[in-house]
Amino acid sequence: MPSGLDPTKYADQFKHRVNIVKKGADNSGKQAIDDVLDRVIDNDTLVYFPPGRYKLNTNHRHVGLRNLGIIGQNAVLTHGRVDAIEGFDVTKGEYHGPAQHFKIGVPDTPHQGKFVFGGFTADWRGENEGMQILNHHTAGTSVIQNIRQVGMHSLGCQGPFRLNPATENAFVRAQNIDIRHGGLTYQKTINTRDTYDGGPYAGRSWATSGITMHPRTQGKLRLERVICGGWPDNGIYVIGGHPGTGDGTVEVINCIAGNSHASNIRIGGTDSKIIGCKVIIDQSFGNEFYYEQRPIRIDDGSCAVKNTQIIQKKPTGWSLTILHGVQKALIENVSITIHESPTKALVVDDAASNVTVRNLRVQTPGWQATENILFRGSGDVMENITVDGEPV
């Protein structure tokens, strides 16, 4: 995937253009650049990181701004040493404060106007490394692109992205994002968080997700060409808001996801879509804290899954699940391959309504499948369903 952004492409979109190195930022990765960065981030400003390595030792939270760009041209983001972390806050080490690089806008005071962010590599190949790269809430139009992770996120805190088109007309487009290396559950890190001490969900590494939204999302999020793998609290977790509080729209297009718990692509909302995607399960988290990795889950609202492949080489969870909150769903031109182990291909909750399943192909290499094993529930319309080439 491309890892840089050309600053000349965006220069005429902002009144002020700042080369952070010319303002005194060290691009060798030895000295932290936080003071310089806070001085230059402002309204109607494009902040440009030339090629190099940049160390951040705290988070950068900016609320109430209008029109901002933060872009790199093959720029590498690193962070200072972390000796102790509790939940989402670093409590000891060279780095201090929230384990987060950038927070632009908040839910009640979202960013205004345009926002451009990208052209960065987050280097987490060392010990105890991994931050939330961007937490972004907007009432405007945002483009997040050309970002990749190298090394595994190993601090057990929030995953790399929360993207929230907070208002009805807001639009966030994220493309060319590579977070395939995933993250560790907090129990395998130095994080001392104690998430839900009891009950059926004890020990879950909440928010250590690949990409998330916000419960009150109202606008539209489009994800294109995202590679997402191995996160303990869902991979692409973009449900368009919670029913009654958010009714946003999500489009997940031409993405690849794999090996996340509890779901790899999880959507909901109004007129939301998964198109041209591939989900591959070929590695398990193990069963100490996590026991299932569902490829695709539809939570609520009106959603479609089209032209998509699910390949379960090591199945641990239902392949495609349609939950009770779904008011309308279309499953069309979907291929599901389940190797060796008897596992559900399609589960439709009895309370889900207006479900159409068309051109669904199920393959079961290595075992003899039956309808009872593969399917639970049914769509209102079921057309051209085949199992190992035979119609059912």
Image (spheres, rainbow, N blue to C red):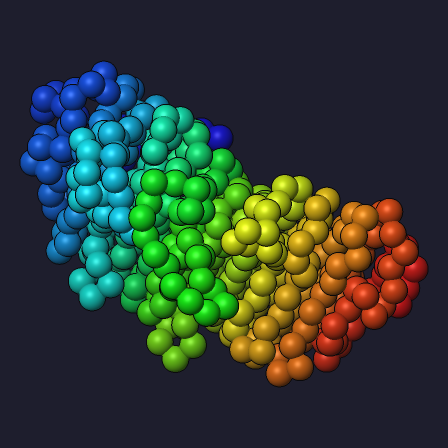
Q: Which residue corresponds to the image point at 53% horizontal and 69% vertical from the top-left?
A: 299
**x then y, percent, for residue 142:** 31, 50
Numbered-mark total: 0
Q: Which residue corresponds to the image point at 85% horizontal and 47% vertical from the top-left?
A: 365
For the C terminus, which image quadrant? bottom right
Q: Residue furthest top?
A: 28
Any part of residue 50 in sight: no
Q: Which residue corresponds to the image point at 34% horizontal and 33% vertical from the top-left?
A: 128
Q: Which residue corresponds to the image point at 74% horizontal and 54% vertical from the top-left?
A: 336
**x then y, percent, for residue 98:** 22, 46
Any part of residue 229 in sight: yes
Above or below 229: residue 50: above
**x then y, percent, for residue 386:** 85, 61
Above or below 155: residue 250: below
Whether residue 15 sits left or right of residue 234 in the image: it is left
The quarter holding residue 75 reads top left
**x then y, percent, for residue 49:** 24, 27
Whether residue 241 sits left or right of residue 56 in the image: it is right
Which is more toward the observer, 224 or 91?
91
